[in-house]
Image: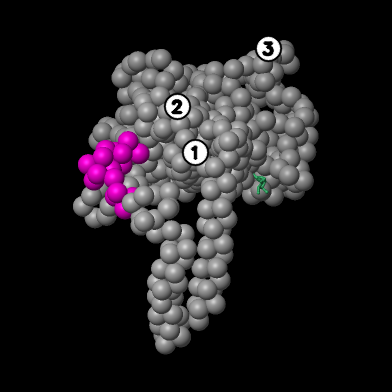
Amino acid sequence: MNPSDIHIGLKGVKKSYGKKEILRGIDLTVRRGEILSLVGPSGSGKSTLLRCINRLIDIDSGEIRVDGKDIRKIDPVELRRRVVLMPQNSVMFPGTVMENVMTPLKIAGIEGEKRVVNALRDSGVPEELFHRDAEKLSGGEKKRVALARAIALRPEALLLDEPTAGVDPKKVELIERSILDMVKKRRLTVIWVTHDTEQALRVGNRIASIKDGKVVKVGKKDGFEWEGVY
Amino acid sequence: MGGGLLSGIPYTPEQALLTMAMAGVLIVVAVALMRMKRLGTEKEYLYALLKGGVQIFLLALFLTYIFSSPYWYLLIWILLIGMVLVAGRTSAKRASGMPDAGSVTTPAILTGSVVVIVVLALSGAMPMSPQFIIPLSGMVFGNSMTICSLTSERFLREIRLGKDRVESALSLGIPSEIAMDEFGKQAIKAAIMPTIDRLKTLGIIFIPGAMTGLIMAGTDPLVAAEYQMIIYFMITGGGMITAALTIYLMRKKVFTKAEQLAEWV
Ligand SMILES: Nc1ncnc2c1ncn2[C@@H]1O[C@H](COP(=O)(O)OP(=O)(O)OP(=O)(O)O)[C@@H](O)[C@H]1O
Ligand SMILES: [Mg+2]
């Protein structure tokens, strides 16, 4: 593989909380424009890993590179605008749905209602919600607004932490569709954390599974061996 | 006539002791009532009376000594520095879990208080004698300490409750300063609102402490009212400085240089 094809690269990543080692040497590469499904049992360190890549937390040892550059050498605010994390517990900011998407843009010095509207549409948020109080939306609606908030920044990569958890099955498909369409349209690199093995197969180009803070398997989705993953 | 320091209160210390003993009848009343109601608080009440009493008599002896000492201007420095350190340490306990909290609370209290004390001195509101400097400084430090405790406690609580919200903001490339802004404002407001509310009811519900003292000491009520207002200027001005500085300094503890929430939060 050509090294410039690697968008996000992790080497020997370790992270402990107190005495408890959560990530125990993670090696992983994500290619430009691919969707990597990340699966693993609860508590295996999936969220922790995404938070490390976005640098919400620092790793203890090893290295994480984005575009070949150590993330510790990139300004964290800039990094987070390029590699946006949609956290497992996304929280709405006070204000309307539009304002929620607008706020991070404004702070980044970008004006553009058009961009906000496009992001909302691409995320499958219906127009009638645009001016509603974001904190009063349903769980699934909030997930989509959080997605819009992330993509409005026009990132190069998206870190999705269970973007459809707690959403009713009919809407899951809708969210999946909008993410997949958008990713294709914008050529985004995606790490998609999910508990749903079916979803991992549906959305991912490749699948990686972690267990107890270690990568146990990475592979093409065709013929992916689920044994030992859960 | 009385030889006390406050010419308005017409007792010598010996006469005052007798008066105090007579007023002690009220202790008997309180204890009797506690017994009757079986509150079981008599012991604690008597202990508190004794402890508090000993403390203020020691303070009185100490003040008497300072007031009459030719070296009062040296002793007062020790006292003021002691006040800041105690206030800083007391406040630091409220910022639960924050490492090296004293490095936030002590400078915040010190700065707010020093500004006030300097203004009081320059404006002549605080004549340069220990009779004024000590009680006024005590009030200023005490007030700054309360404000600092309230601010830091509230700020930490808000940040901890709003952790997911703060991290949602950070993860969208919003700088920590903006991500926490709202919580900082809430904390400052919560700390200064009680003072503002008290200002509004001033003179209607109660006569504030300094005014009470001045009137009893024979000061013209108008002057006492003016002085009371000066005291409110100083505790609100100093309080705001302390509160704002507390948040400013805490931001550097709560967030890392890499714009992350610190792990201890
Ligand atoms: N701030 C923290 N302090 C201490 N321990 C933590 C912290 N955050 C996570 N952990 C621990 O790290 C481990 C991995 O957590 P993480 O959230 O990464 O798991 P996960 O794979 O995302 O699980 P889930 O599928 O349930 O979301 C868990 O045991 C968790 O308790
Ligand atoms: Mg998780």
User: Amino acid type of disc 3?
Assistant: Ser
Question: Which residue occupies the foreground of this view, B174 or B99?
Answer: B99
Name the one closer to the observer, B68 or A230: B68
Which tag, 2 or 1, sits closer to the chain's start? 2
| x and y percentages locating residue A81 in the rendered image | 51, 21
**Residue B243 on the magenta segment:** no
Q: Identify which residue, A30 or B157, lies in the foreground.
A: B157
Q: Say whether mark 1 is within 8 Å of ligand 1.
A: no
Residue for badge 1: B130
Q: Are marks 2 and 1 in contact (CB under 8 Å)?
A: no
Q: Quadrant of residue A8?
A: top right
Residue displayed at 75% across by 32% down = A60
Q: In the image, are marks 3 and 1 on the same chain?
A: no
Q: Residues within 10 Å of mark 1 (few under 14, many from 20)?
A: some
Q: Mark 3 belongs to which subunit?
A: A
B222 drawn magenta: yes
Nearer to us: label 2 or label 1: 1
At a point 21% along the width and 52% down the height, the residue shown is B204
